[in-house]
Image (tube, helix red, strand yellow):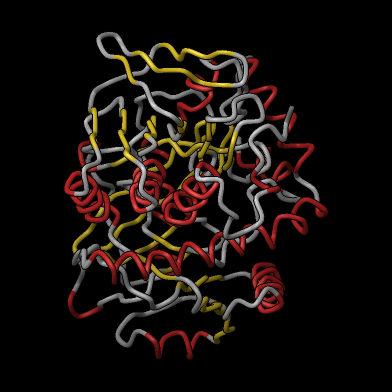
Amino acid sequence: MSKAIIIGGGVIGLFSAYYLRKSGWEVEIVEQGDLSDNCSFGNAGMITPSHFVPLAAPGMVEQGIRWMFDSKSPFYVRPSLNPELISWGLKFIKSATKKHVERSARPLTDISVLSKQLYLEFAADSKLEFGIEDKGILMLFKTAKMVEEEQHLAAEAADLGLDAQYLSPEQCSELQPGINLDIAGAVHYHCDAHLYPNQLMRVLVKYLQEQGVNIHRNTRIDHIDHQIGKITGLRSSDKEFKGDAYVIATGSWSPAVARLTGIKVPLMPGKGYSFMVPQDEAKRMTIPSILCEARVAVTPMNGSIRYGGTMEVGKINQQINMNRVRGIVESVPKYFPDFKPSLPAEKDIWYGFRPVSPDGMPYIGLSAKYSNLAVATGHAMIGLSLGPATGKLIAEVLSGEATSVDMEAYRVERFG
């Protein structure tokens, strides 16, 4: 039996372990934390085939510059002379073109549709409960400019084979009676779904351990042994790991881990925040929403509502920017007049670091330098959404099988 060592215990690493184990591999996971909290836990829990436009898109550079002067803005690049940030920024600017968006739409759609299908299969096959609901997602908007943009995107979605329906404010209200809305309209992406991330992570870890996957917690890899064309082992401060294949799935920490092998994986951490508020039974939300102008996600889960948003690109740090959280809080009543969440205490605010590639596309596949090294990172805001598909693709490439979707757009060394 071949053995795979996965570095990283987030949703990408766990689903890579799931599909490798399903394919007959012996699997070990090496995780620097204790698996009680990482970027996979606090996200909005959305499964989003609707997200076929990469972050690197026309207008994002100009918009990002304007937002840099607003402490509550949804997107912020922290100014720095950090060479990695400068290099990332130049690549981002080069990627933010109409041609890149057009070229990326089909790969993002294909992997997202596959991932949703795999989530539904996983829920049925494993009999695990993690709050998955196939009700779609509502894109809510208030301005004439956003009406035009979202109608255009809905038409593009239809061309890609996605189920998207434009709704008037009245039609939108009929979907969730009792919830007051102040919007110009909405698009209901029936192709989307949502789940409860905290529960998913807990049950997935337990399931993998029951299937014989060995998980090493609080273990940081300090050295990766390699020869020409092959990884030969991993070392932490007190352990050694040997396998036939290795996977780097360490999210925002991936560049540092990849450097141990001599390869470059350009990405920057994008800090996001979220917090939970109990549901009002009289005004019960059942369908998640994205507040388009505010770039805020609102998701019903586990009897509560999770509010989340912001993309703060910069070095990893443990500081909570309360103005960013305040921006989330203040945006909600503009769309839901009866929803007025209070600014949460710092102890009740979750934050995590999304791994953002310069072109907004994930890195998935084998390294060109090492025949037994796969990389799975750079998923930005859609890591949880693409978890199952990424894991399946990693299992396929390491097993030498034909892949479920074309992999060229996710090539690991596409930046050289």
- In this view, the residue in front, 53 or 10, is 10
User: In the image, residue 224 lies at what x, y percent?
Assistant: 45, 15
Position of residue 89 measured from the top left corner of the image (x, y, whole percent): 69, 30
Residue at the top extreme of this rendering: 237
For the view shown, which residue lies furthest in the front direction? Answer: 1
Which image quadrant is residue 415 in?
A: top right
With respect to residue 100, does 353 lie above or below? above
Q: Quadrant of the C terminus?
A: top right
Residue 209 location in percent, x, y?
A: 19, 44
Taking the image as shown, residue 147 lies to the left or right of residue 7, namely: right
Q: Residue at x 39, y 29 (%)?
A: 7
Q: Residue at x 25, y 66 (%)?
A: 131
In the rendered structure, the answer to whether residue 142 lies left or right of residue 276 reads: right
Q: Residue at x 30, y 25 (%)?
A: 32
Of 102 and 402, the residue lying toward us: 402
107 sits to left or right of 246: right
Question: Residue extending furthest right?
Answer: 99
The quarter in which the N terminus is drawn is top left
Q: Is residue 215 left or right of residue 169?
A: left
Front in this rendered view, residue 45 or 221: 221
Question: Where 412 falls versus 341 (above or below)?
Answer: above
Q: Which residue is at 54% across, 62% downward?
A: 112
Query: Residue 305 falls in which quadrant of the image?
Result: bottom left
| Image quadrant assignment for residue 267 | top right
Percent position (x, y) of residue 136?
44, 75
Residue 345 to residue 248: above or below = below
Toward the viewer: 191 or 210?
A: 210
